[in-house]
Image (cartoon, rainbow, N blue to C red):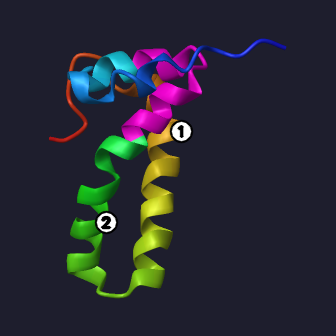
Amino acid sequence: MTTQPRQYHILQGQGVPDGGLVGQALTGDQSAFELLVSRYHTSLVNYIRSILKDDGQVYDVLQHVFLQLYVSLPILLRNVSLKG
């Protein structure tokens, strides 16, 4: 069994667009999805926390959000940011 290279960890601060990461994640590059999670983790935690104010629930919701992102990868547009 072969695995995809973890090339995006070194590119994290270099502005790799979300669409490029989505495309790589769809080819099985786990590091591309990990970078998407890393890129949005803090802002999502802060946003969810501002609504729920319960850390236990915050991380449950966050896990659900990232699971939905993963499941939705095949239908995401590759030329748009996930931030919007």
> How far from the left and from the top, in percent, is residue 78?
30, 17
Image position of 5 with respect to 64: above or below: above
Q: How dense is the environment of label 2, judged by Cα within 10 Å: few (below 14), some, or many (20 and up)?
A: some
Which residue is under mark 1?
71
Image position of 29 with respect to 40: above or below: above
Q: Amino acid at mark 2?
A: Val
Instruction: Residue at 28%, 70% (x, y): give it.
Output: 48
Which residue is under mark 2?
45
The mark closer to the camera, 1 or 2, is 2
Considering every residue shown, the one lying at the far bottom of the view is 54
Image position of 11 with respect to 39: above or below: above
Instruction: Based on the picture, tell me whether residue 40 belongs to the magenta stretch.
Output: no
- The part of the chain drawn in magenta is 22-36
SS at badge 1: helix
Instruction: Residue at 42%, 55% (x, y): give it.
Output: 65
Q: How dense is the environment of label 1, judged by Cα within 10 Å: few (below 14), some, or many (20 and up)?
A: few
> Which part of the image, by quadrant, shows the C terminus?
top left
Q: Amino acid at mark 1?
A: Val
> How far from the left and from the top, in percent, is residue 32?
46, 26
Q: Is residue 73 left or right of residue 46?
A: right
